[in-house]
Image (cartoon, coloured by chain):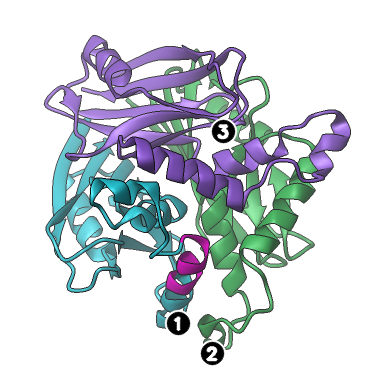
Chain colours: A green, B purple, C cyan
């Protein structure tokens, strides 16, 4: 059994940004030597997430507007009494999901035709990390 | 270590439909020979999901009405400028989740008393796939 | 390959409660002997969840108020025609997520600086279970 671990670093220019990471994950899977198994891709910070969806600019903006409606910034959150101002980022990442597990088949990510993997930053402009753990044979 | 892969195909009659797949997954787990491990069950299309919840018709309708409130169809989504009309399906599947990992113990799905596995279709009436990957010993 | 299974039991005093379980999971991972792998942590009841976020009291209350807005209790849900009164608990747990997969590196949970694991109860005051499955080498 192979277990292979790697990390991706992010430091987004904008506070909120979606970054496509499909190729980076595929490269790690290639390095791992896993032919049949899975790759866990998980944000290590609680104001960021990882999700799978379509790579289409309009949809990415729809997602961001939708998240702003469901979990608005600028409200008087209790979390802000600690000096923080990012409670909405915690909520938004909860909607999008904080991790995915990707199937590996015949040495490659076994994704559907439109599946792309994204890092979702909701409180960026600083260094943050995603752990990737490939497991299998 | 065993890694066993199978796929389930769906072609729902309605655009939006929840399909119970607990038995189908259990059958694949049986075929895999895995006695202790996990089974990843993941939608391969970005307008469908997989979730675990209660098998009760009223609740299924509650879920669908609730999703329509949180992520309405018929809005003027930017994604629709590409000719698509299914932005809400992308959002709804995000709420429900696109995959689950099920524990396998003593050769069987280790589910709680009311846990049932569902395929959640939000843009159906065409062929779509779910990947199942059983891993363990 | 090691596959190690354990269960955590809960019986919360309040109907809705978030319980931090990071140490309990770390202890199970220690007992498992897994040095490199993952631990699946999954609620076995459909009105409870497991999530990773920040351990800050104000934020925990923000989460609960937010969930009450997105999935209010006391509505006339169709699920309640069965005699149940907890449809909102099913919806709330769906938002928070029903499971997480935690990376294990060098024999320890490989969590970011602020990542804490929580059990999320939405219909408590009775015995409920979480399954933990550590897998790896």
Per the model, the C-alpha gap separating discs 2 and 3 is 41 Å
Sequence-earlier tag: 2 or 3: 3
**Label pair 2/3, CB-CB below 8 angstroms:** no
In which quadrant will I find the N terminus of chain B?
top left
User: Who is closer to the viewer here, C117 or B72?
Assistant: B72
Mark 2 against mark 3, which lies toward the viewer?
Answer: 2
- Per the image, the residue denoted by label 3 is A28
Per the model, the C-alpha gap separating discs 2 and 1 is 8 Å
- Per the image, the residue denoted by label 1 is C58
Q: Chain of mark 1?
A: C
Magenta region: which residues? C64-71
> Can you give x and y, in whole percent of width and height, for residue A117 in the image?
63, 37
The single residue placed furthest to the right in the displayed view is: B81
Judged by its main secondary structure, the magenta piece is: helix
Q: Secondary structure at mark 3?
A: helix
**Label pair 2/1, CB-CB below 8 angstroms:** yes
- Per the image, the residue denoted by label 2 is A81
Left or right of residue A103, residue A67 in this image = right
In the rendered structure, does residue B71 fall within the stretch colored magenta?
Answer: no
Q: Is A23 above or below relative to C63?
A: above
The single residue placed furthest to the top in the displayed view is: B31
Q: Same chain for marks 2 and 3?
A: yes
Q: Is C118 above or below relative to A107?
A: below
């Amino acid at each position: 059994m192979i277990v292979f671990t790697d990390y991706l670093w992010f430091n987004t220019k904008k506070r909120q940004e979606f970054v496509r990471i499909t190729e980076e994950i595929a490269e790690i899977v290639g390095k791992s030597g896993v032919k049949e198994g899975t790759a866990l891709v998980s944000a290590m910070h609680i104001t960021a997430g990882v999700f799978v969806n379509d790579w289409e600019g309009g949809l990415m903006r729809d997602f961001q507007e939708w998240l702003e409606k469901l979990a608005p910034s600028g409200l008087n959150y209790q979390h802000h009494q600690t000096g923080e101002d990012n409670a909405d980022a915690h909520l938004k990442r909860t909607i999008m999901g904080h991790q995915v597990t990707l199937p590996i088949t015949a040495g490659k990510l076994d994704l559907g035709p439109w599946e792309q993997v994204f890092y979702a930053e909701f409180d960026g402009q600083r260094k943050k990390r995603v752990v990737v753990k490939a497991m299998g044979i």
